[in-house]
Image (cartoon, grey):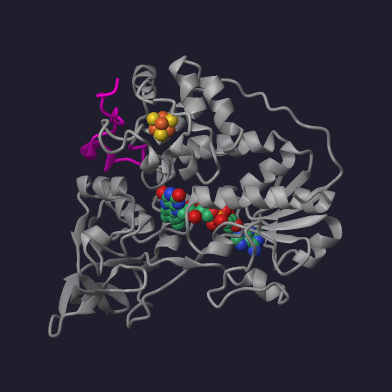
Amino acid sequence: MLKASRVPMPTRSAEERIRCFDEVALGYTPQLALEEASRCLGCKNAPCMSGCPVGVRIPDFIAKLKQGDADGAAAVIKGDNNLPAICGRVCPQENQCEKLCVRREKLGGSVAIGNLERFAADNATATSCARPEPCGLKVAIVGSGPASLSCAADLAKCGVEATIFEALHKAGGVLVYGIPEFRLPKALVQKEIDQIAALGVKIVKNVVIGKTLFIDELLEQYDAVFIGSGAGLPSFLGIEGENLNGVYSANEYLTRVNLMQAFKEDAVTPILLGKSVAVVGAGNVAMDSARTARRLGADVKLVYRRSRAEMPARAEEIEHAEEEGVEFVLLTNPVKILGEEGKVTGMRCVQMRLGEPDQSGRRRPVEVEGSEHDIACDEVIVALGTTPNPIIKQSMPSLETTKKGTIVADEWGRTSVKRVYAGGDAITGAATVILAMGAGKRAARAIIDDLCGKKD
Ligand code: FAD
Ligand code: SF4
């Protein structure tokens, strides 16, 4: 097995997938999972584990898979990770656990930990979840994304009554309104949310904290409040033409397609179905927008001011986008959105070159003089990142926030307000599912320690 290379994930063909929203990655068969699990060396010091923000016992769950025991594997994972089918699909394992796997360089490539996690979660049949005795504590949780779900699940496992308040009509945060079906099927997200609800977590939808109910009011009824409200406020380019009909933020575009099915003919709030779409940005959100537009029948150009090597999206998403026919227009920066009669007709862009590295070590894009040119398109999707929505801060001025609007909290999620905790994108700005989950778990631990007076 030492020479065996990593078992590739079976995927739907590019021709088939651009005609539907079905999941691209098909998952390992039991035979493939066994083959891949057998590549794990069961290292005693398990370097892979130190790359996992929630500390999943990786060699232990893979050992269960080697015995053909998916239930056992899922139980090991769920000890530390409340959303394994989700993480198995969307976590950037290549930069986390798999980056530290001892097989990475010379032994056929890292063990496909994410693919195996997904297999265990998808194939586990055991659904039992013991509800502990109530401990008498009550915690209110703002938002229902991965940070909140993780926090709620860990609290419930300790007997705390956890109630989630979600602004939207569906729970799951970005997992349901942002990440498209072809990467993360919504039925599967619902299944993992249902398992958390089965622990006794209550989910109250259509409640905007800071408008319908206030944190001060929650503090009167609950022992603590956790804020996991994410970073849902989109950034724009700040250039002329951004108010034209046919310019969307990626957040709005993906929410309308994923959550509101706005592309259907009978949709109450239909979305413009552009024939020629320009997506600005190169992160996961940009790739998701571009690939969604392809599935809705458009020719898609992805416009990015740096080169391919600097694209922040996962390598797999970049490859999938290319296979699906998304054209990358690199070293190009929009300076104006062009329009006629209020509608988008194109983008004026300039050519860029890469200059000296900036503070983050990435080479700074520099405009090439006299390089203005136009790109024709009838729809523009801006995917340039997001910041936290200011509603909560506005309704609670004593809650300390940074200039960027993120909530200030210590590593355990304690904020400037007593009994108020926060985690996930609300404190870091747009990040990842697993980091949000890790923050939710740490805050759950801190809440229990603080309220029960047994701090380490
Ligand atoms: P969110 O998931 O944003 O959830 C916050 C929730 O709080 C939302 O449901 C919101 O409606 C609710 N809320 C907000 N304000 C209020 C209020 N005042 N009252 C009540 N409810 C409120 N990460 C990865 O790891 N891998 C990926 O492949 C990946 N792809 C992504 C693709 C897209 C399109 C996007 C947008 C993000 C992606 N991310 C990815 C990032 C990841 O989804 C986020 O980092 C993660 O969801 C953050 O979790 P959270 O719980 O902090 O917030
Ligand atoms: Fe298995 Fe790789 Fe982790 Fe070693 S480092 S236990 S081979 S997954």
On the image, which quarter does residue 33 sit in?
A: top left
In depth, the one of 341 and 80 nearer the eye is 80
Q: Residue at x 51, y 64 (%)?
A: 429
Q: Residue at x 21, y 64 (%)?
A: 307
**Left or right: where 245 falls relative to 117:** left
Q: Quadrant of the N terminus?
A: top left
In depth, the one of 346 and 129 nearer the eye is 129
On the image, which quarter does residue 252 sit in?
A: bottom left
**Left or right: where 139 falls relative to 79:** right
Find the residue positioned furthest to the top.
Answer: 67
**Is residue 89 shown above or below 236?**
above
Main SS, magenta region, reads loop
In depth, the one of 219 and 34 nearer the eye is 34
- Indicate whether residue 2 is drawn in magenta: yes
Find the residue positioned furthest to the left.
Answer: 370
**Is residue 451 shown above or below 6?**
below
- Indicate whether residue 182 is drawn in magenta: no
Q: Position of residue 123 (x, y in %)?
A: 48, 23
Q: Ligand 2 is found in which quarter of the picture?
A: top left
Q: Position of residue 44 (x, y in %)?
A: 48, 29
Q: Residue at x 38, y 80 (%)?
A: 238
Q: Position of residue 206 (x, y in %)?
A: 66, 55
Residue 114 visible here:
yes
Span of residues in magenta: 1-24
On the image, which quarter does residue 402 sit in?
A: bottom right
Find the residue positioned furthest to the front.
Answer: 45
